[in-house]
Amino acid sequence: NAGVTQTPKFRVLKTGQSMTLLCAQDMNHEYMYWYRQDPGMGLRLIHYSVGEGTTAKGEVPDGYNVSRLKKQNFLLGLESAAPSQTSVYFCASSYEREYSYSWDEQYFGPGTRLTVT
Amino acid sequence: AQKVTQAQTEISVVEKEDVTLDCVYETRDTTYYLFWYKQPPSGELVFLIRRNSFDEQNEISGRYSWNFQKSTSSFNFTITASQVVDSAVYFCALSEAGGGAQKLVFGQGTRLTINP
C-alpha cells in the first residue's frame, strides 16, 4: 500500500496563477482532509470530505476550492494564487468505525511545499 | 470554539534526559479525542497516540508516556531517556465532533532538540 500520496512535492507559482494539488489514498477511506502548515501555527484545516461527491469548509477555506469526484482522490485548487498561500500543504485520510465517536488516526501524506512569489 | 495550546515553542535537552511536552486544550464537547503527532526533520507526520475523553488512564509505550487529566484539560507527553532520534516537532491535536468527519484542531507545536 502506498498510503496517502501527494502530487507535486514542490511548486513555485507567480501571483495570480492557478494550480491543483492532487491527493490520492489507497486505503478505501471515506474521509479526506486538506491542511496547511505555517510556521508557528501548527496545521489548520482548509477543506474536508466525508465521501465521494461531498466537500465541506474547514477553518481556513478562503482562496481554495476542492473536489472529490472519486473516493480515492481529493483535489485542492488555487484559482488565483496569492503570496499568503505560501505554505506546506498536507492531505490526510481516515475512516470511521462502525459505531459512533470511534475515530482512528488520520493518515497524512508527505506534504507539498508551495511558494507563491 | 476548540483550542489546543502548546506553550513550549522550543525545548532543548541533552541526550538521556527526561523531557515533558505540555498540551492544554479547550472544548465544550463531552466526547472528544486527543492525539499526538511527531514531525521529524524529513517533514512527514507520524501518529503517536490517540486518547478518547472517556479514558483517563495513562499510557506508556516504551520510552514514551502520556498523562491525560480532564480536571486540568491537559494531555502531556513525556519522553524518558531521550535520544537524538527524538528530535522533531511534536503536535498535540483535538478532534472536533460533528459532520461525521474528524476535524482536527492542532496546537502550535513544540520543537524538541536532543543534543548528544
Image (cartoon, rainbow, N blue to C red):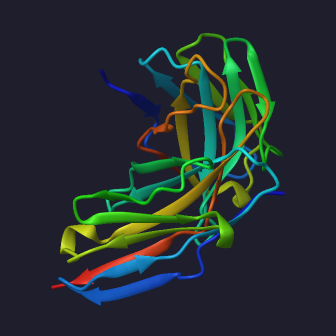
Q: In the rendered image, which quarter contains the N terminus of chain B?
A: bottom right
* Residue at x-position 52% and y-position 49%: B51
Observer-nearest residue: A106 or B19? B19
Q: Is residue A26 left or right of residue B62?
A: right
Residue B67 in the image: state x and y as whole percent.
47, 66
Observer-nearest residue: B50 or A89? B50
Residue B97 in the image: state x and y as whole percent.
74, 39
Q: In the rendered image, which quarter contains the C terminus of chain B?
A: bottom left
Classify residue B73 by image quadrant: bottom right
Observer-nearest residue: B74 or B85? B74
* Residue at x-position 58% and y-position 12%: A71
* Residue at x-position 61% and y-position 65%: B107
Residue A117, placed above or below residue A108: below
Residue A101 in the image: state x and y as whole percent.
65, 32
Residue B10, placed above or below residue B78: below
Observer-nearest residue: B53 or B19? B53
Residue A89 in the image: state x and y as whole percent.
56, 47
Q: Is residue B108 left or right of residue A24?
A: right
| Residue B45 appears in view | no
Q: Is residue A16 left or right of residue A9?
A: right
